[in-house]
C-alpha cells in the first residue's frame, strides 16, 4: 500500500507557497529537488533538506521507505499539491 502523503502536500501548499502553490507549479518540484540535492546523487539527505524549512520539517514523512534519504520519486509524491 502506498503511503498517503496528502496531508504533507496540503501543509506545504497552505503554509509554504514558495514551494508549490498551483498544480501547474507541480512540474517545478523536480527542479526544486535538483536544487536541494546539491550532491547530485538523486537521494536527498537530511542535511541537504535543511536548506528549505518545509522540506526539512517534513523529511521523515517524505522518506516513505525510511532509509534515511528522500529520492526524487519520494519527493514528488510527498510534495505534490493535494488534488
Image (tube, helix red, strand yellow):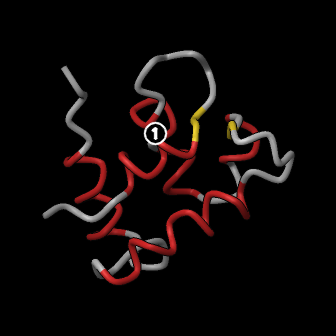
- Going by the image, does 58 lie left or right of 83? right
Above or below: residue 16 compared with residue 80: below
For residue 44, which quarter of the picture? Answer: top right
- Location of the N terminus by quadrant is top left
Q: Quadrant of the C terminus?
A: bottom left
Q: Secondary structure at mark 1?
A: helix
Left or right position of 65 against 4: right
Q: Which is nearer the eye, 79 or 14?
A: 79
Residue drawn at x 79%, y 40% as measured from the top left: 41
Seen in the image, is 1 located left or right of residue 68? left
The residue under the point 53% across, 51% down is 55
Q: Is residue 51 left or right of residue 73?
A: right
Q: Residue at x 48, y 78 (%)?
A: 18
Q: Residue at x 57, y 35 (%)?
A: 70
Residue under pointer 1: 74
How far across and down, in percent of the image, does residue 64 sit? 40, 26
- Label 1: few (<14), some (14–19) or many (≥20) C-alpha neighbours in 10 Å: some
Picture coordinates of residue 73, whole percent (x, y): 48, 43
The furthest residue to the right: 39
User: In the displayed structure, would residue 79 be above or below residue 63?
Assistant: below
Amino acid at each position: 500500500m502506498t503511503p498517503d502523503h496528502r496531508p504533507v502536500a496540503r501543509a506545504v501548499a497552505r503554509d509554504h507557497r514558495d514551494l508549490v502553490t498551483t498544480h501547474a507549479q507541480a512540474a517545478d518540484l523536480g527542479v526544486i529537488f535538483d536544487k536541494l540535492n546539491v550532491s547530485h546523487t538523486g537521494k536527498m539527505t537530511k542535511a541537504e533538506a535543511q536548506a528549505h524549512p518545509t522540506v526539512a520539517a517534513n523529511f521523515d514523512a517524505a522518506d516513505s521507505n525510511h532509509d534515511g534519504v528522500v529520492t526524487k520519486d519520494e519527493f514528488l509524491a510527498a510534495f505534490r499539491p493535494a488534488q
